[in-house]
Image (tube, helix red, strand yellow):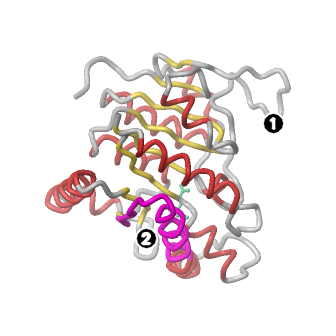
Amino acid sequence: MRIVIKLGTSTLAHATGHLNIRRVEELCRTLSDLKNAGHEVILVSSGAIGMGVGKLSLKERPSDMATKQAAAAVGQCELMYTYDKLFSEYNHTVAQILLTGADLRDEERRANFHSTLFRLLELGALPIINENDSVATDEISIGDNDTLGAIVAVNAEADLLILLSDIDGLYDADPHKCPDAHLLKTVSALTDDILKLAGDAGSALGTGGMATKLHAAQIATEAGIDMVIANGKSPDVLYRIVDGEDVGTRFAAKGVRV
Ligand code: GLU
């Protein structure tokens, strides 16, 4: 299986912005094992800005563009340094690709991305993709990594997109406010009622919320790719998803792969 896994800042970092070392170690071990089992893995990793906030000892996630871009420049280094170190322990080679919306809208740049990605997979490397936040202004950015994950899954012709988050999946009501909210196990169609469940919450360090995840589900399922939202607090969940177990919320692909 070719799997695209999106990791949110809330999965990778503590609320302080510093790396959640135990979590990231477990994730890298699990992803290495999935690769050893023959799966092709592509990571879409957030955390550049969050990690930069920690490293620069900023008090909170910046709202002005220059500080955000500076934080991303610092944090992206830290992120790749950590992935390189941890995946090397299991003999896997990581490769960084940074993209903006403008890269994906331009036919030639998109084709270059496609061929680099496929060559990396042929070479057995593990592509790690993020938005190029240090140059992406609002006009040219994709804006959130849930959407980026879905776009990458489509370009990679993936079999499955997994969004790991700090929530177990999509609920029929806001679980923070409604104690008897139910987790939806499968969503077979993104109806208006389902889209209304989005809300707008995101964490203090990350960007997405449920709205961006449902947007990602639209892009992926339209292209014939199943998508799962699951809680990244226990990276073991990845084995269970790949084994086809009922974990989190699964959005069923529409019709035949396009
Ligand atoms: N690209 C952003 C970062 O690395 C994250 C965007 C998102 O989490 O949606 O900090």
183 or 142: nearer the viewer? 183
In the rendered structure, does residue 90 fall within the stretch colored magenta?
A: yes
> What residue sits 67% from the left and 66% below the top?
19
Upstream in sequence: badge 2 or badge 1: 2
> What residue sits 55% from the left and 18% below the top?
186
Q: Position of residue 240 (x, y in %)?
A: 57, 29
Inter-mark Cα distance, 2 to 1: 32 Å
**Is 124 on the left or on the right of 177, as rendered?**
left
Mark toward the viewer: 2 or 1: 1
Provide the secondary structure element on which disc 1 rests: loop
**Is 199 on the left or on the right of 120, as rendered?**
right
**Residue 226: which quarter of the image?**
top left
Taking 189 as reference, is 73 above or below it?
below
Segment tinted magenta in the rendering:
75-97
- Cβ at disc 2 under 8 Å from ligand 1: no
In the rendered structure, does residue 180 fall within the stretch colored magenta?
A: no
253 or 62: nearer the viewer? 253
Provide the secondary structure element on which disc 2 rests: loop
**Is 165 on the left or on the right of 243, as rendered?**
right
Taking 129 as reference, is 147 above or below it?
above
Residue type, label 1: His
Residue linked to disc 2 = 137
Q: Position of residue 181 (x, y in %)?
A: 77, 22
Taking 72 as reference, is 32 above or below it?
above
Q: Position of residue 148 (x, y in %)?
A: 41, 51
Residue linked to disc 1 = 176
